[in-house]
Image: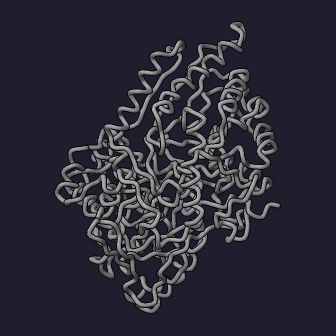
Amino acid sequence: MRKLALDDEILMKAEKPERYIGCEVNSVMKNKEDVAIRFAMCFPDVYEIGMSHLGIQILYDMFNKQEDIWCERVYSPWVDMDRVMREKKIPLFALESQDPIKEFDFLGITIQYEMCYTNILQILDLSGIPMHAVDRTEEDPIVIGGGPCTYNPEPIAEFFDMFYIGEGEIAYGALMDLYREKKASGMSRHDFLKMAALIPGIYVPQFYEASYKEDGTMEAFRVIEEGVPEKVEKQIVMDFNNVTYPDAPVVPYVQATQDRVVLEIQRGCIRGCRFCQAGMVYRPLREKNIDRLKKQAEIMLKNTGYDEISLSSLSSSDYSQLNELLTFLIGICKERGINISLPSLRIDAFSLDVMSKVQDIKKSSLTFAAEAGTQRMRNVINKGLTDEDILNGALEAFKGGWNKVKFYFMLGLPGETEEDIKGIAHLCQKVAECFFDNIPKEKRTGKVAITASSSFFVPKPFTPFQWASQNKPEEFLQKAHTVKDEVRLQTNQKCIRYTYHDAYIAVLEGVFARGDRRVGKVIEEAYKSGAFFDAWGEHYDENKWTAAFENCGIDPYFYTARERETTELLPWDFLDCGVNRSFLEREWETAKKAAVTPNCRMRCSGCGARSFGGGVCYEN
């Protein structure tokens, strides 16, 4: 009989007790006496966010298909439960068995965004696991990190025993085999880590060290453990049609952020947007066979009971068999009242034909990532969209019966001018005019509503903009106010709603994105002062972070506000993500000329991804 880690009195007082009890539909239960390896899979944010993450669902399914491995899940306790667990000294536990995380062999933490870094320390702290990897003993789990933020793991390097660089379906088999050998032979923790570092894609930070010049830039990054490789290469799935995928994903009791079946149709992207890390590090584009997708859609809908299915990719419009897939999904979803969600669609490819296939099921707002308000700025970032594309796409949406359109923009992009900033308001005005000029009153289904949302540009590793400077908070805010004021001057201002993100959080994200190991002490200092759930605006405390930087003698703008020389050694240069540095430098210079680089299907740009031997690089 499974006993809950939290008693009824505690659960009844919790904001959402469903976050902590487990036993959801399709969750995996095993007898812990029958397994050799116990793996706690962690998403360091609240349950509803973590349950929406496709990567964890994939790895959870992959591990649990092995009889001798039991993979369980753990998420960050929300602030109310965090307080109770500290007061009552309740150790953090896994949902399935309700056993303490400290009893597991592995604690795997997926790191999707930089603002969860203090929550990683919360997980370690509540679990009773020493924060620093060098302080852990044979009794502690192996703490391994994965996900997009591992493409610069240095700010959090001291908190992890190892990082997995790349897609998780590749090297975990070898790592688990090595751990079985460790248990059978009595291998020490140090020897296990050293042998793990020889597995492609595994980075063990304690075997490397950095040194710095007087100006604060990196002087060298070297191996300090004999036999460990100098470069760590990302791992990537090339046989995408036969890769593992969950037929029965876990269905939560409480509504998750992404409360639907997720059908992954491809990985990678052909577009080459210069700000987009995912578009670079997940190269090359690899499509999944449409027959497999059809089978997966059928069985996942049957096994979950969801009333919505979403297509997952970086650019769904680029899936070569999208029309056939949509026709199939309409056929199985329409009669069941299941909605089809089409995120990541490019406005130039969102044809009336595609819209007409899904509009009869459920009307909702359409979201387009225009990214910049002017053509020049979209050329700088290599978005590959023209004003004509945007206006034609919006018109087709309006003709198709939609009257709510959302546009995503960025402010603070390299080379941005006041004209580019005001261009956001002007573009929204043109879209509103497009509606009023072309849709007769008798055919309008309601008032047109245009929502424009600005995030603030954060340069990321392994992008052509990794050398760019980032605006300071006051610069970001000034630009946002410029847009807001310009919106008020537009004829159709009542149809336009403008919002923008938190500028201070964007700068902190920028520090973490391109920081080195010295930033780790700032994260630890902020956490010890009470900072966590920093991605949540109501819990982010700017004063705590300001004090942490001051106490540690670190200037955050050293990592954000200065433009780097392409000759500078960067903290992530020891990683090989498959996209070569010469390509990124070339794109950085091309951006300064506001010139466009054709997408991968139009012309190969020699980025280096061809070395993986498949995908879009070999289509023709």
Indicate whether 369 appears above or below 177.
above
As drawn, the residue found furthest toward the left would be 551
The quadrant in which the C terminus is found is bottom right
Residue 198, how many percent across, how many down?
50, 84
Confirm whether residue 87 shows in the render. no
| Viewer-proximal residue among 392 and 341 | 392
As drawn, the residue found furthest toward the top would be 442
Confirm whether residue 47 shows in the render. yes
Residue 487, how many percent across, how many down?
47, 20
Residue 143 quadrant: bottom left
Residue at point 78%, 49% (across, down): 320
| 195 with respect to 98 (left or right) | right
Residue at point 58%, 36% (across, down): 370
Indicate whether 114 appears above or below 191.
above
Indicate whether 387 appears above or below 61.
above
Q: How is the image coloured?
A: one colour
Indicate whether 467 appears above or below 13.
below
The quadrant in which the N terminus is found is bottom left
Residue at point 73%, 67% (across, down): 614
| 279 with respect to 110 (left or right) | right
Residue 358, how many percent across, how many down?
73, 32
As drawn, the residue found furthest toward the front would be 593
| 184 with respect to 312 (left or right) | left
Image label count: 0
| 516 with respect to 197 (left or right) | left
Residue 456, how many percent across, how many down?
43, 41
As drawn, the residue found furthest toward the bottom would be 185
| Viewer-proximal residue among 463 and 195 | 463
